[in-house]
Image (tube, rainbow, N blue to C red):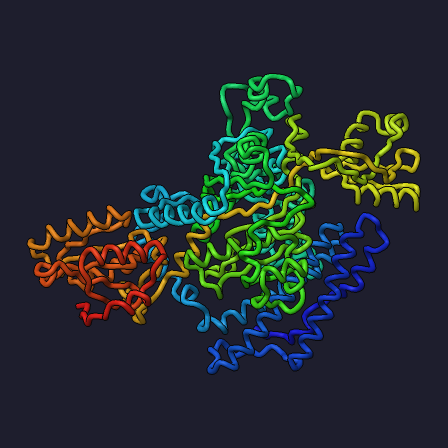
């Protein structure tokens, strides 16, 4: 593939695009982001010039011969990835602004071209990539052969997106969850809860999940087989274009444009496209009209008829809880996340905590998403373990009492600005500096980013393969203040394993509205305070005449606005006489000067009630496990012999901490082996005895494969003086100590309070041949 010069890739002028949208008040935010992207594009061009006007160099698939050539290619790859990020952001903004299809298509063309160049460079750099890229098949084979993870219901052909954990995988998963609890729940004094997987429709309707997780589907009207509409349309267009018979250049261009827009078509537009192309099902049968497919697993809770099950309860605050619970029966779902179980219990959690703020609640449990095309092992599945934390704080006080403990910690930050400019991950900035410079929005968010970094590295994730990527503006929910994803590099590229979001007060506010239950906290002042606020005075008569039954929704929306938002509305009304208010539901109100006014005033208060904001770290345990296993994969250097590959799990999460081996199958070792295992179990160490007839070297190797970090070996000398050898997995080094000391050392190293280099300073190594 011919790779074009880096600086000549972009075809669209971002400065021109931002001018296009400036005239529309509705698209002011989009115009601002396009202007930022234009500045970023200019910066990258200057950066490329600074780097010596580099042009992309193809090496015809030959691996770079020296470090300088490798570094040059890596630099070019990083620059290209910046352009990919910029153009992806631009395309999203164009779609949000309903730009002409031709402009979106041109942006998509550029994006496809850039991604092709990224793929080409990645191939050239293949030999310099980490081991999990080069030996993915060997790693996957080891995990399957040693029964870490296998497809569920395998003897029946398996089911996509469902996996079984075997004994070592189950033990690894349990150890990671235990470490998560220790690192977060216990260390941070969190309140742990456990809720059901079944969730009523009304809860997920309120949270936005019912409307959010949908893709268009079509169904074979005869066989009832379902197909994802946009992907099937793309497939059929490809078949038509590849045929190249009876298609004019104009028709080919039109089809190519339609293919690029397939994922953005509405149900009506998708229907027209399928009918124009006379698309049939794979079996040759007619297709149904496109319909939205929700990615949640729907179900029926109880015998109640589904009709009305999702309606909001018409209960007042004083009605009995049983009436409210009955209204939630009927239609429901398997939960897509565990967070809603925490939000709906906020009042009880606050009461349990003595009314004190801030506080955090946590939950470990299963989530479910009916993925249309599950793939990539544990990275995209239909049932998955999650660990979620909801840290409730005052909206205006997001400092953290323990922030000083992580202030000087340096974590890899991939900020929004860097994604759109030089593409570099910041590795020399402390968390304290990032918060002070507003790279990270607040102390609490920064604190949890640091704690997550420590957790993941403690699990064995390599620092060089870990980064925290800030969400771009187009990726942010309308209510979010700041969001960062912990991403780990694995054989499938960079994968999100944990999200960190400042969700403001969206969740509690939404549930309060629908449930008619106040989910608020309060704080008392030592003495009455004179506070300034912006008073809202509506002209209810005019509002009622204009908006009729919509009037209350308008007043509720204004009441929820902050003082700053109210002053912004007042400024617009004073300057232009009108203001357009758009609710998160999409409802629009055209407000005139006569309908309302806002003015600054003061009042005396002794207590303040507020809806808490939420800082949410959310962890995908399955994804973390996948990355741990890839990052732990090692080779002794003989890559074609699987027994010389092993899993270098940190001892604290290793499925089995210690293997106990006799030097031979001599029955005289039995009593000592049992004593050794009993001593390990008494110290809480998971230990197994391998007394098979295989050679000692093969037994070491097969236990290395499952990541067992330590081995206690009993030999004939042990029968004389009760001493044993202790072997460390990674170095294969051994020391000789008494059995009681061996168990103590293994226990302390397994808990992380002692490491092997320290042990070697106290006990001399012994020379043992593994044969």
Quarter-of-image position of residue 163? top left
Q: Residue furthest front?
A: 527
Residue pictured at 80% horizontal, 32% vertical: 554
Along the viewing direction, whichever of 756 and 38 lies nearer the viewer: 756
Quarter-of-image position of residue 6? bottom right
Disc tally is 0
Q: In x, y percent, where is residue 172?
A: 36, 50
Apparent side of residue 22 relative to residue 718 in the rendered image (left or right): right
Q: In x, y percent, where is residue 145?
A: 30, 54
Residue pictured at 84% horizontal, 25% vertical: 548
- For the C terminus, the image quarter is bottom left
Residue 166 visible in rendering: yes
Along the viewing direction, whichever of 207 and 506 lies nearer the viewer: 506
Residue 374 visible in rendering: no
Q: In x, y percent, where is residue 53?
A: 67, 80
Q: In x, y percent, where is residue 749?
A: 32, 58
- For the N terminus, the image quarter is bottom right
Residue pictured at 62% horizontal, 36% vertical: 207
- Give above or below for 262 relative to 245: above
Along the viewing direction, whichever of 630 and 360 lies nearer the viewer: 360
- Give above or below for 306 relative to 356: above
Along the viewing direction, whichever of 615 and 761 lies nearer the viewer: 761
- Give above or below for 172 relative to 135: above
- Give above or below for 731 relative to 690: below
């Amino acid at each position: 593939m011919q790779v074009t010069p880096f600086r000549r890739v972009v075809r669209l002028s971002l400065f021109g695009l931002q001018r296009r949208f400036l005239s529309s008040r509705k698209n002011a935010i989009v115009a601002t982001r396009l202007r930022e992207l234009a500045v970023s594009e200019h910066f990258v061009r200057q950066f490329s010039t600074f780097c010596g006007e580099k042009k992309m160099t193809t090496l015809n698939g030959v691996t770079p011969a020296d470090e300088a050539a490798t570094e040059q290619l890596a630099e070019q790859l990083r620059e290209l990835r910046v352009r990919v990020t910029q153009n992806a952001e631009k395309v999203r903004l164009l779609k949000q602004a309903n730009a002409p299809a031709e402009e979106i298509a041109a942006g998509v063309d550029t994006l496809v071209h850039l991604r092709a160049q990224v793929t080409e460079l990645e191939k050239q750099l293949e030999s310099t990539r980490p081991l999990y890229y080069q030996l993915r098949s060997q790693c996957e084979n080891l995990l399957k052969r040693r029964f870490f993870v296998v497809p569920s219901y395998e003897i029946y052909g398996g089911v996509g997106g469902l996996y079984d954990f075997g004994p070592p995988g189950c033990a690894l998963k349990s150890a990671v969850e235990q470490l998560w609890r220790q690192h977060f729940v216990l260390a941070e004094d969190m309140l742990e809860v456990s809720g059901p997987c079944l969730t009523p429709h009304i809860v997920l309707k309120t949270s936005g999940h019912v409307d959010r997780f949908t893709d268009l589907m079509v169904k074979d009207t005869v066989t009832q087989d379902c197909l994802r509409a946009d992907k099937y349309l793309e497939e059929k267009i490809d078949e038509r274009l590849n045929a190249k018979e009876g298609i004019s250049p104009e028709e080919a261009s039109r089809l190519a444009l339609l293919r690029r827009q397939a994922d953005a078509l509405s149900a009506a537009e998708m229907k027209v496209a399928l009918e124009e192309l006379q698309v049939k099902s794979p079996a040759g049968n007619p297709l149904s009209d496109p319909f939205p497919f929700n990615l949640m697993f729907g179900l029926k809770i109880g015998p109640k008829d589904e009709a009305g099950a999702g309606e909001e309860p018409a209960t007042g605050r004083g009605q009995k809880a049983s009436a409210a619970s009955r209204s939630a029966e009927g239609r429901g779902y398997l939960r897509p996340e565990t967070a809603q179980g925490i939000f709906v219990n906020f009042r009880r959690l606050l009461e349990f905590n003595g009314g004190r703020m801030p506080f955090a609640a946590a939950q470990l449990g299963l989530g479910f998403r009916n993925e249309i095309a599950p793939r990539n092992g544990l990275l995209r599945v239909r049932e998955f373990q999650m660990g979620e934390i909801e840290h409730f704080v005052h909206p205006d006080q997001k400092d953290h009492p323990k922030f000083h403990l992580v202030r000087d910690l340096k974590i890899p930050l991939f900020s929004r600005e860097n994604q759109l400019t030089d593409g570099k991950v910041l590795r020399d900035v402390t968390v304290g500096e990032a918060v002070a410079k507003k790279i990270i929005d607040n102390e609490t968010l920064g604190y949890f980013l640091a704690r997550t970094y420590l957790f993941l590295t403690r699990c064995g994730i390599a620092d060089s393969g870990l980064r925290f990527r800030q969400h771009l503006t187009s990726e942010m929910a309308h209510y979010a203040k700041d969001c960062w994803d912990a991403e780990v590099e694995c054989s499938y590229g960079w994968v999100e394993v944990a999200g960190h979001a400042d969700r403001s007060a969206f969740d509690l506010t939404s549930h309060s509205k629908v449930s008619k239950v106040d989910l608020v906290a309060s704080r008392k002042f030592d003495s009455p305070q004179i506070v300034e606020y912006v008073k809202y005075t509506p002209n209810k008569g005019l509002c009622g005449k204009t908006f009729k039954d919509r009037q209350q929704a308008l007043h509720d929306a204004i009441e929820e606005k902050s003082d700053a938002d109210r002053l912004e509305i007042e400024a617009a009304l004073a300057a232009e006489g009108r203001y357009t208010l758009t609710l998160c539901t999409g409802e629009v109100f055209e407000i005139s000067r006569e309908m309302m006014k806002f003015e600054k005033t003061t009042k005396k208060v002794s207590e303040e009630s507020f809806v808490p904001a939420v800082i949410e770290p959310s962890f995908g345990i399955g994804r973390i496990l996948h990355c741990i296993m890839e990052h732990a994969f090692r080779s002794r250097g003989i890559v074609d012999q699987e027994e010389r590959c092993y899993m270098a799990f940190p001892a604290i999460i290793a499925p089995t901490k210690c293997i106990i081996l006799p030097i031979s199958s001599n029955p005289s070792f039995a009593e000592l082996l049992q004593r050794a295992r009993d001593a390990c179990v008494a110290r809480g160490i998971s230990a197994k005895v391998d007394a098979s007839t295989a050679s000692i070297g093969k037994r070491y190797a097969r236990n290395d494969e499952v990541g067992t970090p330590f081995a206690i070996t009993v030999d004939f000398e042990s029968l004389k003086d009760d001493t044993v050898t202790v072997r460390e997995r990674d170095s294969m080094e051994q020391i000789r100590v008494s059995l009681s000391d061996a168990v103590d050392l293994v226990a302390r190293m397994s808990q992380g309070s002692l490491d092997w280099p320290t042990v070697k300073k106290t006990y001399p190594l012994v020379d043992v041949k593994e044969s």
